Image (tube, rainbow, N blue to C red):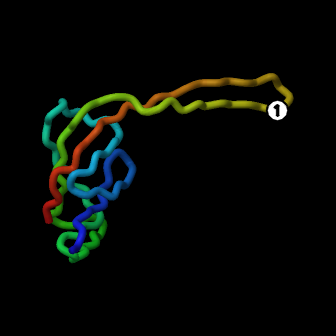
Amino acid sequence: MSENYAIVATGGKQYRVRPGDHLDVEKLPYPEGYTITLDEVLLACVDGEVEVGTPTVDGAQVVATVLSHGRDRKKTVFKYKNKTRYRIKRGHRQAITSLEITDIEV
C-alpha cells in the first residue's frame, strides 16, 4: 500500500503533508471553516508515482480547511554586548493559522 503525500511551500517554509494532517503555518487571511488550495506544490507522490516540480508540479494542488487562528509559543530574543552594559530582552509570538489537509490533487 503506497502513501500519498506532497511537499508544499507557504509562508516562506516547506511542509510535507498527507491527507488528514493538521498543520500550523504563517497566518493566512481566510476565515475559519474556509477551504483553500495551496498551489505551490514542489513534490507530489500519489499512488506510488512521484512527480518532482521544476520548481512546482504543474496542475497539482493541496486542498486544506482553515481550522483556527492563534499565536505560536513565545520565543525569547536576547541581545547582549560585552563590557558596555547593553542588554535587551524581548519576546515574540508569531501569528499562525491551523490547517487540516483534506486532499492532494495532481
Return the residue nearer the eye: 46 or 90.
Answer: 46
Q: Residue at x 34, y 42 (%)?
A: 25
Q: Residue at x 18, y 30 (%)?
A: 31
Q: Which three-letter amino acid code belongs to the residue tagged 1?
A: Asn
- Residue 26, above or below 9: above
What is the x, y in percent for residue 91?
55, 26
Return the residue nearer the eye: 92 or 17.
Answer: 17
Q: Residue at x 60, y 31 (%)?
A: 77
What is the x, y in percent for residue 27?
32, 35
Is 56 positioned to the left or the right of 35 in the image? right
Figure disc tally? 1
Q: Which residue is mark 1?
A: 82
Q: In the picture, residue 84 is in which quadrant?
A: top right
Mark 1 element type? loop
Q: Residue at x 35, y 39 (%)?
A: 26
What is the x, y in percent for residue 70?
34, 28
Is 81 positioned to the left or the right of 42 in the image? right
Q: In the picture, residue 86 is in which quadrant?
A: top right
